[in-house]
Image (cartoon, grey):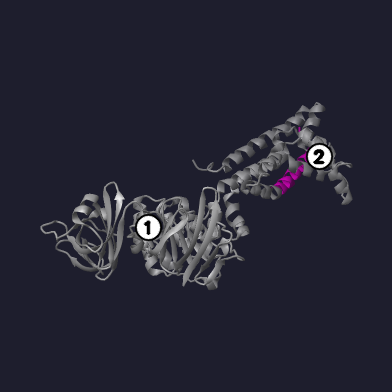
Amino acid sequence: MSIAARFRIDRAGFSLDVDLELPGQGVTALFGPSGSGKTTLLRCVAGLERAPGGALSVNGDTWQDDKLFLPTHRRPLGYVFQEASLFPHLTVEQNLAFGLKRVPAAARQVDTDHLVELLGIGHLLGRKPEGLSGGERQRVAIARALFTSPRLLLMDEPLAALDPQRKAEILPYLERLHRELSIPVLYVSHSPDEVARLADTLVLMEDGRAKAVGPVAEVMARLDLPTAHGGEAGVMVEAAVAAHDDAYALTRLDFPGGALWVPNHAEPVGTPARARILARDVSLALVRPEHTSILNILSAEVVETAPEGKGRTLVRLSLAGTPLLAQVSDKSAAVLGLAPGKQVFAQIKAVSIL
Amino acid sequence: MTLTDADLSAIFLTLKLAGLTTVLLLLIGTPIAWWLARTSSPLKGPVGAVVALPLVLPPTVLGFYLLVLMGPNGAVGQFTQALGLGVLPFTFAGLVVASVLYSLPFVVQPVQNAFEAIGERPLEAAATLRAGPWDTFFSVVLPLAKPGFVTGAILGFAHTLGEFGVVLMIGGNIPDKTRVLSVTIYDHVEAMEYGQAHWLAAGMLVFSFLVLLGVNAFKPGGRRP
């Protein structure tokens, strides 16, 4: 089960040249700065952009090769645009039905009632798009795409046009979709937080090329790919809720390399949780610091260091295999003698639960 | 003072001409408007200009060339004769052909503007929802462009009602066949029958005012403050 995509486009001032083999399940983020070709790649996959000579197969079905080019309307995909792009002349319900009624009954596999509930749009069905908030529109657009029982869901920065509040409103729905549906998703984003929160696989796009492909935690922690950090170096740690300390309003998250105490995270023990730790929130010491207010101090080994410029060094650490990034001054790196193999203690000032 | 049979006949003929012309204009103008709205061909400029020509040309110029073209020795005339249709000038059919050309920009331009205002995105969204090109045209483009069609149809109809120069050149003044309202009014004035002329002229005035009122109501956003 995989998605194989090979596209080449040469235009004045822009070129795209990718040859990707992506997992046929889970969320794959196409991540990179604007102009890096991630939206163009997504449009090629949808057939909205023609890339002669390209090839695309999705979980065994060929959508494009030398002889074949399925037009967009014959590709079993769902597409969520940056702006919801609902049809203004139709009600929410009619918008949802637009794609659904064009799919043969035998190919309908989605429980539409469940989706309406999952995305919280049941109370909007009779309304016209112009009466909805941006967040509501985007949720309807996501439902509309999923109603067609797509074999592949394409999302082009579905949150970028929304303010932080609306974003926070939609993200939980996207996470639920991720957990409950088995449709593979290609998700274009330039937000490291979104990627860390939603994606399993990360494709790092730069100048129309795929610079790196791999599990999100791995690619984000690579020092040789500054763009993978999206301007803010940090790692994503996959953990699970292990215990609650109600007296201090804290929750312990366990992950393979140790444990993290975070502010009370009201989920049952065993619930998976993703934590993001920024490099600038991690400081290093050679001996275990005592008498400190910092809760999370973990034993780590230096894997490699890379100068970041402006007097700062980025250090990649391993917490028994789990990568962690720390940002220290060049002077500290020299004084502490940070080099591969060095045992250190990482003090983590802040952890955000995604 | 009431309308004579000749007046009523002219009114009926004019309405028939305008109605038929409007239907033909919508059928012919829609593909032209679609092409003009979507193409990036270098021919877009010239074709757009040709469609817009009746806006600036004196109707007599248009009528003159149509007369020459459709006459017994003109290219179109030769063709219609070869088809056994005879020649078109001074027939109702000829008047319809001339009216369609004369009013073409009044339909094409509002419809083209409406198509352009829709943009690419709804078409792409429809394609990702399994709608093929024709399906998309009827289920998305037409409903979204409806105000443009209504405006175009009203303007095309009204403009055809008022044509005079082209009619005189190509249709002449044959009762029940080519004598339309504007020509009838002219005849009344020539014959010093100002009362008769008033009836028809005032009717046209009121009708035109109502038409323009209707067009305004259908402008995008015109119905809501």
The magenta-colored residue range is B1-25
Residue B3 visible here: no
Give the percent coordinates (x, y) of residue B211: 64, 39
Give the percent coordinates (x, y) of residue B119: 55, 49
Residue A294 visible here: yes
Give the percent coordinates (x, y) of residue B133: 61, 58
Q: Is residue B19 magenta?
A: yes
What separation in Å lies between label 1 and label 2 (alpha carbons)? 63 Å
* In the foreground, A74 or A233: A233
Disc 2 target residue? B66
Residue at the spot x=14%, y=63% of the render?
Answer: A247
Residue at the spot x=58%, y=43% of the render?
Answer: B218
- Crowding around mark 1 (Cα neighbors within 10 Å: few <14, some 14 to 19, many 20+) is some
Looking at the rendered structure, the secondary structure element under dot 2 is: helix
Disc 1: host chain: A
Residue at the spot x=19%, y=53% of the render?
Answer: A335
